[in-house]
Amino acid sequence: QIVFAGHDDAVWCLALGATELFTGSFDMSVRVWNIGDGRCIAVLDDHSSPVWTLCLSSTHVFSSGNDGRVNMWNMSSWK
């Protein structure tokens, strides 16, 4: 069993990539997890409100929140 723990508040949404799990939380962040070992490999924290939805393309993750923004993150650099 692998537990993905690290958010400071409730997890609201999930998205599964080929080797990563993406979680969006009420703590206003998106976390990227290695699904093989449960390690957090990135914290994407540019929202100013809870993250409600996540969507993946082959190269980017998109997150949206209560702040009215959609953020696009490059999976190569997490920027």
Image (cartoon, rainbow, N blue to C red):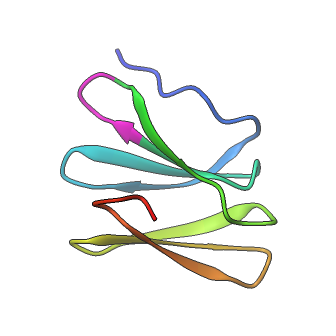
Q: Nearer the viewer, residue 66 or 40?
A: 40
Q: Quadrant of the N terminus?
A: top left
Q: Is residue 71 above or below residue 7?
A: below
Q: Is residue 45 magenta?
A: no
Image check: 63 left or right of 29?
A: left
Q: Is residue 39 above or below residue 53?
A: above
Where is residue 20? Give x, y as percent. Answer: 30, 45
Q: Residue at x 76, y 61 (%)?
A: 50
Q: Residue at x 26, y 55 (%)?
A: 17
Where is residue 60? Give x, y as percent. Answer: 34, 72
Image check: 39 left or right of 26?
A: left
Q: Which residues are magenta?
A: 33-37
- Corner quadrant of residue 49: bottom right
Image check: 38 left or right of 28?
A: left
Where is residue 7? Give x, y as percent. Answer: 66, 36
Q: Is residue 11 above or below residue 44?
A: above
Q: Residue at x 37, y 46 (%)?
A: 21
Q: Is residue 36 magenta?
A: yes
Q: Residue at x 46, y 21 (%)?
A: 3
Look at the magenta stretch and give its main secondary structure: loop
- Corner quadrant of residue 69: bottom right
Q: Nearer the viewer, residue 14 or 32?
A: 32
Where is residue 5? Give x, y as percent. Answer: 56, 26
